[in-house]
């Protein structure tokens, strides 16, 4: 019985680690901002001019409206959130949907909800 429990914990740990690595690989890369919703207002962006690059080593670079920001990021797998080392948002970016070509994230700043659609 002890062996079965130990084997179960090892299996769950491996599965969790594999999912975490798979999600981090999926999130990593250069994402172009397609559109953003701030409160009830939606904004469309010119293709290729605004982007977010998430390096697998934990560094990021974001360019929005010709302003550049660099720093570090980490993935909080259990919550499906991206945490950045800046104070732009009160909360982390919540991953709402993700695929190989599309990323939808949301965040809150005070009482305003931000939603951002990105694509590779």
Image: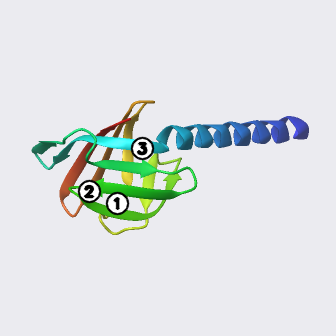
Indicate which disc, 2 or 1, sits on the residue closer to the N terminus. Answer: 1
Disc 2 versus disc 3: nearer the observer: 3
Q: Is residue 117 left or right of residue 28?
A: left
- Label 1: which secondary element: loop
Q: Residue at x 53, y 47 (%)?
A: 77
Q: Residues within 10 Å of mark 3 (few under 14, many from 20)?
A: some
Q: As drawn, which residue projects farthest toward the top?
A: 100
Disc 1 versus disc 3: nearer the observer: 3
Q: Which quadrant, please, contains the N terminus? A: top right
- Residue occupied by mark 1: 91
Q: Position of residue 120 (x, y in %)?
A: 38, 35
Q: Which mark is residue 108?
A: 2
- Asked whether the residues under the numbered discs 2 and 1 touch, taking CB atoms below 8 Å apart as contact, a structural biologist would say yes
Q: Position of residue 76 (x, y in %)?
A: 51, 52
**Residue 37, image quadrant:** top left
Q: Which mark is residue 30?
A: 3
* Tag count: 3
- Label 3: which secondary element: strand
Reply above or below: 91 against 12: below
Q: Residue at x 33, y 69 (%)?
A: 87
**Residue 11, image quadrant:** top right
Q: Position of residue 57 (x, y in %)?
A: 58, 55
Q: Residues within 10 Å of mark 1 (few under 14, many from 20)?
A: some
Question: CA separation, marks 2 and 3?
Answer: 23 Å
Q: Residues within 10 Å of mark 2 (few under 14, many from 20)?
A: some
- Label 2: which secondary element: strand
- Asked whether the residues under the numbered discs 1 and 3 touch, taking CB atoms below 8 Å apart as contact, a structural biologist would say no
Indicate which disc, 2 or 3, sits on the residue closer to the N terminus. Answer: 3
Q: Is residue 81 left or right of residue 119?
A: right
- Residue placed most toward the observer, 100 or 81: 100
């Amino acid at each position: 019985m002890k062996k079965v429990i130990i084997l179960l914990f090892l299996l769950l740990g491996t599965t969790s680690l594999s999912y975490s690595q798979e999600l981090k690989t999926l999130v990593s890369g250069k994402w172009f901002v397609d559109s953003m919703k701030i409160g009830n207002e939606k904004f469309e962006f010119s293709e290729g001019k605004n982007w977010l690059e998430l390096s697998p080593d934990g560094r990021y670079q974001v360019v929005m409206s010709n302003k550049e920001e660099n720093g570090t990021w980490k993935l909080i797998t259990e919550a499906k959130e991206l945490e950045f080392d800046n104070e732009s948002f009160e909360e982390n970016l919540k991953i709402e949907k993700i695929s190989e070509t599309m990323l939808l994230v949301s965040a809150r700043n005070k009482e305003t909800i931000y939603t951002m659609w990105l694509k590779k």
